[in-house]
Image (spheres, rainbow, N blue to C red):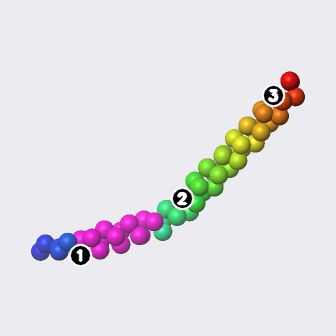
Amino acid sequence: MKKTDAEESYAKRMFRESLRRFFAPLTGAIRGVRRAVRAELRRDDRELELERRRER
């Protein structure tokens, strides 16, 4: 028995939704790490700029 396109797309959507809930904690953790890394890079840039200004 062949599924209709609507049934198939519904099944795919439900599968993706179930994966989204499963991976949500991991996704959130990755976002948090990226945010922390960006903040650290900005801090380093500020420190380097301050050091350059002091050397002048």
Q: CA distance from mark 2 to mark 1?
A: 28 Å
> Does the magenta segment cover residue 42?
no
Instruction: Say which of 43 and 15 sits in front.
Output: 43
- Residue at (17, 73) in percent of width and height: 3
Which picture quadrant has residue 9? Answer: bottom left
Relative to 19, 4 lies left or right: left
Q: Amino acid at mark 1?
A: Glu
- Residue at (77, 39) in percent of width and height: 46
Q: Nearer the viewer, mark 2 or mark 3?
A: 3
Q: Amino acid at mark 2?
A: Thr
The quadrant the C terminus occupies is top right
Using the image, tell me which numbered label, if any, was put on residue 27: 2
Q: Which residue is labeled 3 in the image?
A: 52
Q: Position of residue 21 (x, y in %)?
A: 48, 68
Q: Amino acid at mark 3?
A: Arg
Q: Callout 3: 10 Å neighbours few (<14), some, many (20+)?
A: few
Q: CA distance from mark 3 to mark 1?
A: 63 Å
First in sequence: mark 2 vs mark 3: 2
| Secondary structure, magenta segment, majority class | helix
